Amino acid sequence: MNDISIVIVEDEAIIAEDIREILEEEGYTISGVYFNAGSALIGIQKSPPDLLLLDVNLEDELSGVDIAEFIQIKKLNIPYIYLTSYSDKTTLNKVAGTRPAAYIVKPFIRQQLLSSITLSLANSSPFKATQKLGLEKLNDQLRQKITEREWDVLMHVLDGKLNQQIALAEEMSINTVKFHIKNIYEKMEVHTRSELLISLGKIL
């Protein structure tokens, strides 16, 4: 169980409940499920979550995009993922300016949702600050210990940096970066960055 709180804003009750069940099974705390923008805005301000799942087109005067714009205006520092049944150019242009953490087209599969959430949280500064990632805590969960150098590389991965960017930041070759990442994958028993972030989300 982790302490990450998520708010779901979705006007289709069945979809909202499906999402709630998936996330609670993964250990997330659902701090609110709202079917319209008005109640969502009140709840978000009263108790800001770590992440928002926003349906773009709500059956309401206000949309998920309006909620996102409100968050930006108020500088609430809450990452949000859009959920929508549309992927047309008009919809994409509508949401692009609000800089969402991710954009998921319905219907979606469970792993797609979880991966998007993990990546969005990992790239969120408030999340990284509150999680207090620690090498000692991580190593308590692993058979093979992560070295301090691998930990440095791992922190860059959590920042969303590419191998070349990590190499420049740590003054090492790209091959060395790949070597460290390969070792991290083996110790964490994962094969991709998405799997790595999901695994970390369960441990830390």
Image (cartoon, helix red, strand yellow):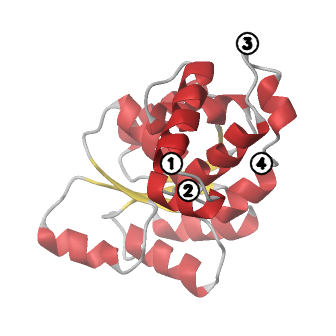
- N-term-proximal mark, 1 vs 3: 1
Front one among 155 and 1: 155
Q: CA distance from mark 2 to mark 3?
A: 26 Å
Residue underneath mark 3: 143
Q: Nearer the viewer, mark 2 or mark 1?
A: 2
| Disc 2 residue crowd, few under 14, some 14–19, many 20+, Cα 10 Å | many
**Residue beneath the point at 56% across and 20% down:** 186
**Residue drawn at 25 percent across, 40 percent down:** 107
Can residue 199 be seen at all in this image of the molecule?
yes
Q: Of the residues shown, which amino acid type is indicated by label 3?
A: Arg
> Judging from the image, what secondary structure is the residue with disc 3 in?
loop
In the image, residue 13 lies at what x, y percent? 40, 42
Q: Which residue is labeled 2 in the image?
A: 166
- Report, in whole angstroms, how far the alpha carbon at label 4 lies from the one at label 1: 14 Å
Whichever of labels 2 and 3 marks the residue nearer the N terminus, that label is: 3
Mark 2 and mark 1: Cα distance apart in space: 18 Å
Q: Which mark is residue 131?
A: 4
Number of the front mark, 2 or 4: 2
For label 1, the residue is 119
Q: Nearer the viewer, residue 6 or 159?
A: 159
Q: Callout 2, which amino acid?
A: Ile
Q: Amino acid at mark 1?
A: Leu
| Residue density around tag 4, few if under 14, some if 14–19, many if 20 or more, within 10 Å | some
Which corner quadrant holds the N terminus? top right
From this view, report whether residue 73 is shown above or below residue 36.
below
